[in-house]
């Protein structure tokens, strides 16, 4: 059987070229006679892999010199605790809650200090991004937290919130490297890589140097201090070496595609294919507010649960995998990350059109 069009929200589709290259190097990486999975993380070969990955990422995102890049483990969810443990110097933080992931992050942070939810879109099942231009940012907040792209609901901050001078912390798991970003506007940018970059098991944290100190909450484990990983250049203990190697290949692939501006253009083109269809469809309807629509995750429904289930089943038979929506939204969700080719999105739109004709 050939490859399917995989619309999974994560772990998700990777560039076929990267997978083929990794397959070619599986038994013998670059004349070493071993797989990257089998080599010492202290070896020269791996040293070069992690250093090249970092410098390519720095180039792609234009990361200023006073920001550190850390390759860590524990997924995005581990950061929900690591962020307050390392950054809550005054014991308080503001959270903007635009979905389940931000809500979970806020709940975790509450274990370590005062959490103020200064904006939320929970009143309408997180289907929009609240206006964040003049929020009641707390005087004593150590940071303002957002989830920039809401994987489950298909919404994205099109403008960063006005944090009134406070450090902005952003979970970018599902929009990482999907478009250019101005790193300087953030204190911390982090994400699990299994959505838009690589295999599960790696989380990348881009953090402004001055935010990394020894002054962390009492009891913070060594492994959960940013300083530990900064000082050891992400090699304090055995890192998720194979995952970092694949991320490095994806960075090279992104550079070859023309970098993040080119990706943005490509992602906009792909998203437009689906949204334009949805906006005139008599059967399907997008669930996110138009102004806040994500380029990466596109949730939609027919309004009839049985018909939704039928669509997912038929789509699977036709080679479109993982279209079932998250249980909290229902219906369908097409995740169309960087590595999803435009042909995949075109084919899906054509399939939906046909399904509509047969079912309206
Ligand atoms: C998937 C996801 C997470 C959780 O990631 P894990 O690596 O499984 O902990 C957190 N935030 C966002 C935005 C996500 O999409």
Image (cartoon, rainbow, N blue to C red):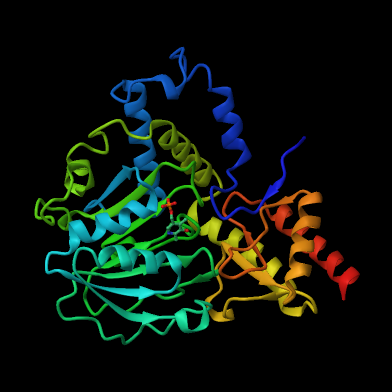
Residue located 46% across and 74% down the image: 158
Whether 153 is drawn above or below 178: the answer is below
Locate the N terminus by quadrant: top right
Residue 310 figure quarter: bottom right
Q: Which residue occupies the foreground of this view, 92 or 3?
A: 92
Residue 51 at x, y percent in the picture: 33, 35
In the picture, measured across the screen, residue 342 lies left or right of residue 207, that is right
Residue 45 at x, y percent in the picture: 36, 22
Whether 80 is drawn above or below 31: the answer is below
Residue located 35% across and 41% down the image: 55
Whether 263 is drawn above or below 126: the answer is above
Residue located 31% across and 21% down the image: 43
Q: Which residue occupies the foreground of this view, 244 or 238?
A: 238
Residue 88 figure quarter: bottom left
Whether 100 is drawn above or below 203: the answer is below
Residue 282 at x, y percent in the picture: 80, 79
Residue located 42% across and 67% down the image: 148
């Amino acid at each position: 059987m050939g490859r399917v069009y995989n619309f999974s929200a994560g772990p998700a589709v990777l560039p076929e070229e990267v997978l083929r290259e990794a397959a070619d190097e599986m038994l013998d990486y670059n004349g070493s006679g071993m797989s990257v999975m089998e080599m010492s993380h202290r070896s020269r070969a791996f040293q070069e892999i992690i250093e090249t990955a970092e410098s390519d990422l720095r180039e792609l995102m234009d990361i200023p010199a006073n920001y550190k890049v850390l390759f860590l483990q524990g997924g995005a969810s581990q950061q929900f605790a690591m962020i307050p443990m390392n950054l809550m110097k005054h014991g308080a933080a503001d959270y903007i809650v635009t979905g389940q992931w931000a809500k979970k992050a806020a709940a975790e942070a509450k274990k370590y200090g005062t959490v103020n939810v200064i904006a939320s879109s929970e009143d309408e099942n997180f289907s929009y991004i609240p206006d964040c231009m003049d929020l009641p940012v707390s005087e004593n907040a150590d940071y303002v937290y957002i989830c920039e792209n809401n994987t489950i609901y298909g919404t994205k901050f099109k403008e960063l919130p006005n944090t009134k001078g406070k450090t902005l912390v952003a979970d970018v798991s599902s929009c990482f490297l999907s478009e250019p970003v101005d790193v300087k506007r953030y204190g911390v940018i982090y994400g699990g890589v299994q959505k838009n970059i690589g295999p599960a098991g790696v989380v990348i944290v881009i953090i402004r140097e001055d935010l990394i100190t020894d002054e962390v909450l009492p009891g913070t484990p060594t492994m959960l201090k940013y300083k530990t990983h900064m000082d050891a250049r992400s090699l304090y203990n055995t890192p998720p070496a194979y995952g970092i190697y694949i991320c490095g290949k994806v960075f090279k692939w992104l550079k070859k595609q023309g970098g993040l501006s080119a990706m943005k253009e490509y992602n906009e083109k792909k998203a437009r294919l689906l949204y334009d269809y949805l906006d005139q469809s008599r059967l399907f309807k997008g669930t996110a507010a138009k102004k806040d629509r994500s380029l990466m995750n596109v949730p939609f429904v027919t309004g009839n649960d049985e018909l939704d289930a039928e669509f997912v089943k038929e789509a699977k038979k036709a080679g479109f995998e993982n279209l079932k929506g998250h249980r909290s939204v229902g219906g369908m969700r097409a995740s169309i990350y960087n590595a999803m080719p435009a042909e995949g999105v075109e084919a899906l739109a054509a399939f939906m059109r046909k399904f509509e004709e047969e079912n309206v």
